[in-house]
Image (cartoon, helix red, strand yellow):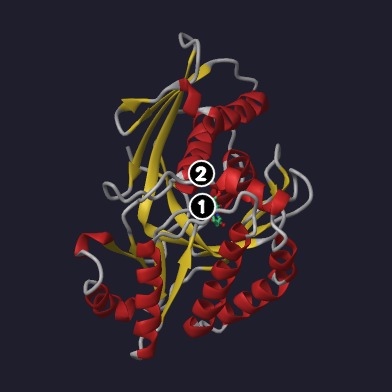
Amino acid sequence: MSKWVRAHTNIALIKYWGKENEALIIPKNNSLSLTLDAFYTDTKVTFDPSLKKDELILDGEKQASGVLNKVVTVLDLIREKAGITDRAHVESINYVPTAAGLASSASGLAALAGAANEAASLNLSPKDLSRLARRGSGSASRSVFGGFVEWEKGTTDEDSFASPVDDANWDIGMLFIIVKQAQKDVSSRDGMRRTVETSPFYDGWLATLDQDLSDMKEAIEEQDIEKVGAIAERNALKMHATTLGANPPFTYWTADSMVAMDAVRTLRKQGFTAYFTMDAGPNVKVICRQSQMAEIKLKLAEYFDEEQIISAKPGPAIHLLEN
Ligand code: 2P0
């Protein structure tokens, strides 16, 4: 039955960067993320025999069929499993502050997997939902769960999925610094492919990941936010270093990203718990204590407009909405 499903975005503290298998989206390494409450996607899928093609209405606007590749991939997998041949009408609403420039593939493809599962009455387990979301977008595999989540890379379609690590019900939060977009992004899909194929730094990145991951899990278990932040920050810097070695080289950093990273280092010198991470775009995310978030936000307002800074707390797993 058609039902609205909500999935929250997640930010990786140990990054996913590179695929072992492009078609199945099997990653080169395990990644670990925090699901957040502030950004999410609501989606409803309806299979409709009168449709000739799948269609997506995103925030009230019908999308061109050229941008539906990831959506059709997930719908085809559901159709195959359920023996459905009808095309689907997909309605989706992204709850991301206007002009935030935040990619929403993690929450978007997870919500789609959940909504398609409902529409096809497949009753998939969370694990199978994670595997399905992964086929749409790798990071979406992690948005099926709340709190801290690890995506186990696996080696096949069957054993590559995410699972919960910790509910994050402690004093941790994240501030998003939404910097102004300067130029067109290299998509994360193209960026990671180019890095794997051409960057001499890629092997160096992979070589340190097991250590980062086990240190991170230990830090989470100890609820040691200083340690969580420090590991996340250096993991992100290593990931971004690989892009500079690619051919042609590229970076997701802009001048404003550098200002934000520097502001976080200054906060740290002033005694705040604050560490940054960055993804395939210029925005900077600050790992901090929820209890210090208001004060840190004020400090960051010395560098950025207040509406560029958004607070987030740990968020829940994918779930059905009432109506
Ligand atoms: C992550 N990113 O772990 C990493 C860090 C960006 C930088 O996952 O090709 O949209 O659809 O699997 O999941 C963004 O990549 O890529 C991403 P595909 P996805 O969050």
Is residue 149 something one can see in this rendering?
Answer: no
Three-letter code for the amino acid on which mark 2 is drawn: Ala
**282 above or below 22?**
below
In primary-sequence order, the first of circles 2 and 1 is 2
Asked if disc 2 and disc 1 are in contact, CB closer than 8 Å, the reply is yes
Residue 302's disc is: none
Is residue 294 something one can see in this rendering?
Answer: yes
- Lateral position of residue 278 relative to residue 79, left or right: left
Where residue 100 sits in the image (x, y, percent)?
31, 51
Residue found at x 55% / y 69%: 237
Where residue 165 sits in the image (x, y, percent)?
59, 67
Three-letter code for the amino acid on which mark 1 is drawn: Ser
- Lateral position of residue 266 relative to residue 24, left or right: left
**158 above or below 307?**
above
Q: From the image, which quarter does the C terminus lie in? A: top left
Instruction: Judge the density around disc 2: few (<14), some (14-19), many (≥20) Cα neighbours within 10 Å.
Output: many
Q: Which residue is mark 1?
A: 143
Q: Which residue is mark 2?
A: 110
Q: Secondary structure at mark 2?
A: helix
Q: Quadrant of residue 174?
A: bottom left
Give the spatial CA distance, label 2 vs label 1. Answer: 6 Å
Q: Residue furthest front?
A: 248
Residue in front for this viewpoint, 160 or 65: 65
Q: Secondary structure at mark 1?
A: helix
- Lateral position of residue 257 relative to residue 112, left or right: left
Q: Quadrant of residue 218?
A: bottom right
Residue found at x 36% / y 70%: 260
Number of numbered tags placed on the structure image = 2
**133 above or below 48?**
below
Residue in front for this viewpoint, 188 or 62: 188
Where residue 222 sits in the image (x, y, percent)?
56, 84
